[in-house]
Amino acid sequence: MANTFKVYRAALSGSAGVVYTAPSATTAVVLMIQAANVDNTVAVPVTSTWNDGTNDTHLVKDLDIPTRSAVNILSGKLVLEAGYTLSANSDGANQVELTVSVLEIT
């Protein structure tokens, strides 16, 4: 079994997009999901979900990220099996940057 730490980033838009997909033959442990509001004028709501191939489960829904602030969306760890996805979106394009830290176990 190999353990590999990885980091992923995304500039969120108004429509939900997949930020991370657990690779085949891999168990992924999501260690951190941070959303940073890079807009200088308004709080921006963020929604984040994970999907097991069938069902979406919300981690947060319309969580307001204050102006020029960052919020850790995940409290604890999230285990994603192969093919499971992590998605996120915000109300506006390029107002929120998402950082995801993952331990992949193969």
Image (cartoon, rainbow, N blue to C red):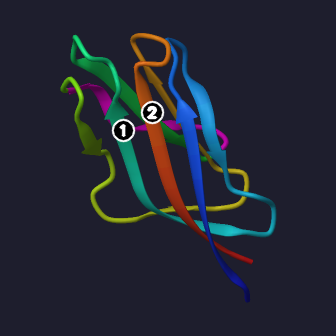
User: Residue 78 or 12: which is nearer the viewer?
Assistant: 12
Quadrant in the picture for the C terminus: bottom right
10 Å crowding of disc 2: few (<14), some (14-19), many (20+): many
Q: Which residue reaches farthest bottom?
A: 1
Secondary-structure class at tag 1: strand
The main secondary structure of the magenta stretch is strand
Q: What residue is at 18 percent from the left and 26 percent from the top? A: 66
Residue 86: x, y in percent? 56, 43
Earlier sequence position, callout 1 versus callout 2: 1
Image side of residue 94 versus residue 4, left or right: left
**Toward which corner of the image does residue 25 lie, by quadrant?**
bottom right
User: Residue 85 or 69: which is nearer the viewer?
Assistant: 69
Q: Amino acid at mark 2?
A: Glu
Number of on-image labels: 2
**Toward which corner of the image does residue 28 lie, by quadrant?**
bottom right
Q: What residue is at 22 percent from the left and 35 percent from the top? A: 69
Quadrant in the picture for the N terminus: bottom right
User: Marks 1 and 2: CB-CB under 8 Å?
Assistant: yes
Distance from disc 1 to disc 2, alpha carbons, whole Å, reads 6 Å
Q: Mark 2 = which residue?
A: 97
Q: What residue is at 27 percent from the left and 40 percent from the top? A: 70
Is residue 106 within the magenta segment? no
Image side of residue 57 versus residue 7, left or right: left
Q: Amino acid at mark 1?
A: Ala
User: Which of the numbered marks, if any, corresponds to residue 20?
Assistant: none
Magenta range: 53-65
Residue 96: x, y in percent? 40, 26
User: Does 31 appear above or below 91?
Assistant: below
Q: Which residue reaches farthest front?
A: 40
Q: Mark 1 = which residue?
A: 35
Residue 15: x, y in percent? 54, 14
